[in-house]
Amino acid sequence: MWFLCSQTCDTSLHSVQNIYYYLVSDSAPEDLPSPSGYPSLMCPQPISGKLAERGHARRENPVVDPYEEDVFSSEVFTDENEDSIAGNEVSEAGTLTDLHNSSNIPEVEILSLLEEKIPLYNLRVNTTSRYSYEHSDWLRSARGSPEGAQESDEDDLDLSPVMMEETLKYFALCGERVVQMTKTYNDIDAVTKLLAEKEKDLELAAKIGQTLLEQNKKLSDRIDTLEEQLTVIDDQNTQLQHDLKLKSNLLKIYTDDPGYSDSDDDIPQDKKPGQFTQRVELLQKKVRTLEDENLKMRYDMVDLRETTDSMEEKEEQLMQDCLNQLGSSKTKVEVMTEELTKRLEENFRLQEEVTSLLAQLVDVQQKVKRMSIENEELTQDRQASKEAQRELTGELLELQEKYQECMDMLHEAQALSRQKRQESIPSIGDWAP
């Protein structure tokens, strides 16, 4: 039979004792590896009768009472080996799963009961097959139940530093147990259960880490605050010591001033008993004089303060005027900038127009040049035409003269021909019968 037990102290003291794992078995194998690496995990002492009676009650009623007066205890009982509790045989915690994976073990319970409060965690391991579990190892109590999961996430873990340390040690020992669970990898359900268990362990470790970080942050803030307070107190102490030193020096100067001291030679012998009274009166006069000077200095300080206030008001007024002028200047600059932008845009537009006009002017000049060349050619052609016309006119006149001469010659020939005809006609009549 296996028995797992750990003890803690009262949470009002915020301290937890070291967790010890007592593993007792009456049927442990002889070739079980020795727990040399974990000497603190062995417990050869027999289990008390009170715990055995509690085991009977747990076996009859497997429901765990969260308010049972037990401090963070973990128990395992079986029906077959109840009498072997008092044995002295021990086994290693890492072989817990390998050696006890039968269905005879009803449950493994870890109770966390602190000052009759609701336990933080309840460990139940019910085996239904060779390597798988029926329930998850870590079952949440009323504080960590699924109904109050949202509330438990917002609350901080009420764990002392020692309890956190021992819980983390327990997680480290659970990591050593994984080495002995290689056979469970063939069972998907067992692997799923183990992963769920590890996930819950990781969640608890993360919450513990968050709690430690918050505590560290609070302590750091408190240290910073105390250091600031210490610095302020040191400054005040230094200032007070300086003021005390100044006052002591001032009092020493007034008490040891030879101009105001009365020697035995200046005072008659019959007036020596009243020397202390005269000295007190003289000191009182000095005090009144100093009070008057102090009052005058206060008046001067008030005047200076009023002057300073007036100067500050004037300076503020000047600053306001400067700001107003700066604002107006800024507005003017913005207006001028906008106008300059418009002018620049207009200038760019005019430059584009000038460029287009210059291009047109170049085209016109080219056209004018071309037309001038054509005009010169046409002028030359016209001059040539005029010269040809004059030549043709001269030739025409010559031809007209020749034509006139030919006509005159024709008329003369016709006249001569008629004359000859007339002359020839009578001669023909003479021949008639």
Image: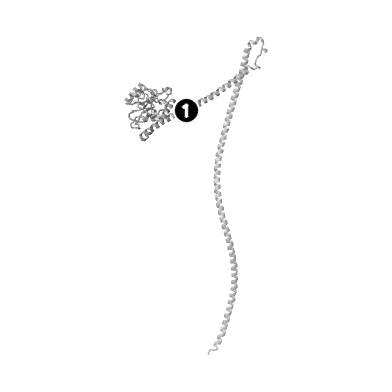
- Give how far across and how far down residue 20 sits, in percent: 40, 25
- Residue 140, horizontal then vertical, whole percent: 37, 29
Residue 31 figure quarter: top left
- In the image, farthest residue toward the front: 30
Colour mapping: one colour
Category of crowding for the residue at label 1, using alpha-carbon neighbours closer than 10 angstroms: few (below 14), some (14–19), many (at least 20) = few
Mark yes or no: residue 319 visible: yes
Dot 1 amino acid type: Asn
Q: Is residue 72 above or below residue 385?
A: above
Residue that extends furthest to the right in the rendered view of this protein: 265
Q: Quadrant of residue 237?
A: top right
**Residue occupying the point 59% across, 64% down:** 380
Q: With respect to residue 201, does 369 lie above or below?
A: below
| Tally of numbered tags | 1
Please name whichever residue, 114 or 50, is drawn nearer the observer in this view of the structure: 50
**Front-most of residues 286 and 402:** 286
Relative to residue 302, is residue 222 drawn left or right? left
Residue under label 1, please give it: 216
Q: For the residue labelled by badge 1, is the local secondary structure a helix, a strand or a loop?
A: helix
Q: Is residue 235 left or right of residue 265?
A: left
Left or right of 120, for residue 429:
right
Front residue of 202/29: it is 29
In x, y percent, where is residue 164? 43, 27
- Please provide percent x and percent y for residue 21: 39, 26
At x 56% / y 35%, what residue is drawn? Answer: 324
Residue 138 visible, this orientation: no
Q: Considering the image in quadrants, where does the N terminus appear? A: top left
| Residue found at x 55% / y 38% | 330
> Could you tell me which residue is drawn at 66 percent across and 10 percent down?
269
